Amino acid sequence: MKYKLGIDVGGTFTDFILISDTGNTCVHKTLSTPDDPSIGVLLGISEIAGLVGTDLSNLIADIETIVHGTTVATNALLTQRGAKTALLTTKGFRDALEMRRGIREEHYNNHYQNVKPIVPRYLRLPVDERISTEGKVMKALEEKELDSAIEKIRAENVEAVAICFMNSYCNRENEEKALRYCRANLPGLFITASYEVLPSIRFYERVSTTVVNAYIGPVVANYLDNLTSKLDSINFHGKLLIIQSNGGLVAPDIVRKSPAVTVLSGPAAAPTAGVFYANLLGKSNCITVDMGGTSFDAALVVNNQCLTSTEGEINRQKIALPSLDIVTIGAGGGSIGWTDTGGLLQMGPQSAGAKPGPICYDMGGELPACTDANLVLGYLNPDYFAGGKLKLNYEKTYKLLEEGLAARLGLSAIETAAGMYRIINSNMAQGVRQVSIEKGHDPREFLFIVAGGAGAIHAGEICKELEIPMFMVPNYASVFCAAGMLLGDLKHDYVLSFLSSFKNLQRNHLLELYSGMREKGLNTLISEGVKEEKIEFHPVLDLRYIGQYHEVQLSVPWEDVLQCNLNSISDAFHEEHNRLFGYSLREGAEIEIINIRLRCIGKIDRPKLVSSGSESIPIEQALKGRRNVFMPETNLMTEVPVYDGDAAIGGCKIAGPALIEKSNTSIFISSSYDCIVDEYCSFIVYSKEAYPEGYYF
């Protein structure tokens, strides 16, 4: 028997899903090890071997592919624990990294402070060189110009170097020369140049992305070295793939060169899994939400396509690489409840993390978190958390909540926990608004897919606030991103600046550039083991009306590019502009191209992620007992039935209010909802008001 293994390293838990070639599945969670996440990975693999009834050596010999998502790059940026980095840039432009776009991000905040650059000014080293906007060499780089900078880099014990010269996107000659010279004279350092990372127009975006790539480079490389060495030590000889921010998979060697492609590595798998599960219900539009231990991620899928963006930021550091359009807020199971200076209750974004964790983990945490509130409100079973592997301390949680936060608020422990529950639900609903309503989409028209260990406890109230009539809790909701990793394809994104109006378009030059990107993507995917017949190419054009500042990314058919079908491309652009901004300028306004992009996709064989399991049993046989839980509709603790969600109850209907307990997920069905279990043992929870006669597949 052969296996594929998906691994998602989160802030609190590391998730695993092991799928055999026959469809047998094993789901597992283990606490993350923040100091060295690879330790938790190896520990989890060892524990999975015991769960499937074999030893580690036999299991690892049968694993063909490991697909891995990691938050190492993200955490390095969030905690500002990346490498000590220097920047070589064109003389006169060293402060562009700090000046950014010169736009105040919070116009009415008098206490607003600019983001601190991750490269301090004394390590932003000017170089006397210059390329014109037409790509002509106005001042050739003299290698001796770099000697003083190299001496400074050595003296300051710099670990990484970013090289970004003005206008190098249209002529990389000076950057290439600087890169070669620095690598020859600074062995052992991580050195990267903007033409390798982001060869496109807009200097600030390019320099920021290049600096981020250098800043996280040694950290990511060190983690990959630790991971691969540990996998080697247990004789893993299969293929290791890393998920990128764009939702695609890539080999570790490419990540070592361009680590910035992994800054949203973990959450990027959720929309891929969302497409899969939405299609099971015959739907092509969905919103995926994933509530983890530290954060809440929301993403939108339209017509089976995960929306992407090049406007990403992590900790206010600009990263202009293609990434899935995911909104992340600090709202997870570990989000801490606190009172502001006005005495009002707040939730997060501070998190208790994995250690010490919420109070109920009984690992030293003393600050009440969302998980503590869910326990006090009865949504969690203290004896069956994580399938019973982690016992929750209800008495200690209730006592510390009552004596601490509740006392400051003048409320009971139950009232305080209910307030925490409502506030974090409202915070998460706002995150969904950002990814849907603010992007011109009505969330009521989308299937709401809920993931994460705690997501299904909160989903009903989020949907109620947004008037979404139905949500789905997949059978593998607790390891949703890990499952999505096994459904992804290999992807590589390429971009080149190409400034031209449609009227003056040099068609041969456009096709020449696209041909070069296509050849590069084809060769890379073939080197990763993808057969040529399984490779697809998806062109994208960054377009705008002449005179506009911002552009619109438009996916176009490959045939329209090859034939330079400008009429078809123009019509599509007008329609997309109208959808986004409510107007189009079909008459009298010329269109221009800013950048050309190409996504190269290598299709891989997907595992059998869902199965109907054994023959279904009546819902009565899945009844575990009854428990008092907080009912939002009445603000009272109410006794409800508790069902075993891991039992084979496909096709069963569960009337609300009720609780469904799976080994790694709890699903709360309030009195406003009913639930039906589909043939794959996923839970479809629907509003009684919206579906008075019930929901039918």
Image (tube, rainbow, N blue to C red):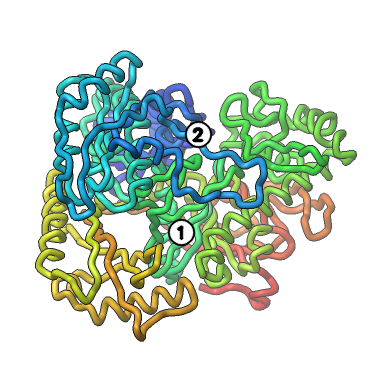
Residue under pointer 2: 116
Of residues 125 and 551, which is closer to you in this image? Answer: 125
Residue under pointer 1: 680
Q: Residues within 10 Å of mark 2 (few under 14, many from 20)?
A: few
Query: Outermost residue toward the bottom?
Result: 587
Q: Of label 2 and label 1, which has the lower sequence position? A: 2
Q: Residues within 10 Å of mark 1 (few under 14, many from 20)?
A: some
* Residue under the point 48% across and 56% down: 299
Q: Amino acid at mark 2?
A: Lys
Of residues 474 and 248, which is closer to you in this image? Answer: 248
> Which mark's residue is nearer the viewer, 2 or 1?
2
Instruction: Please state, as top left, top right, bottom left or bottom right, where the N terminus lies in the image.
Output: top left
Left or right placement of residue 481 versus residue 250 in this view: right
* 288 w.r.t. 340: above or below: below
* Residue under the point 39% across and 68% down: 548
Query: Outermost residue toward the right?
Result: 410
Please state the horizontal and vertical placement of residue 444, each as a whole percent of the image. Answer: 58, 70
Please state the horizontal and vertical placement of residue 316, each as a whole percent of the image. Answer: 49, 42
**Residue 72 in which image quadrant:** top left
Left or right placement of residue 452 versus residue 598 in this view: right
Of residues 204 and 295, which is closer to you in this image? Answer: 204
**Residue 251 in which image quadrant:** top left
Residue 290 can be seen, yes or no: no
* 610 w.r.t. 151: above or below: below
Q: Amino acid at mark 1?
A: Tyr
Residue 405 can be seen, yes or no: yes
Q: Mark 2: which secondary structure? A: loop
Please state the horizontal and vertical placement of residue 8, each as a whole percent of the image. Answer: 42, 39
Q: Mark 1: which secondary structure? A: loop
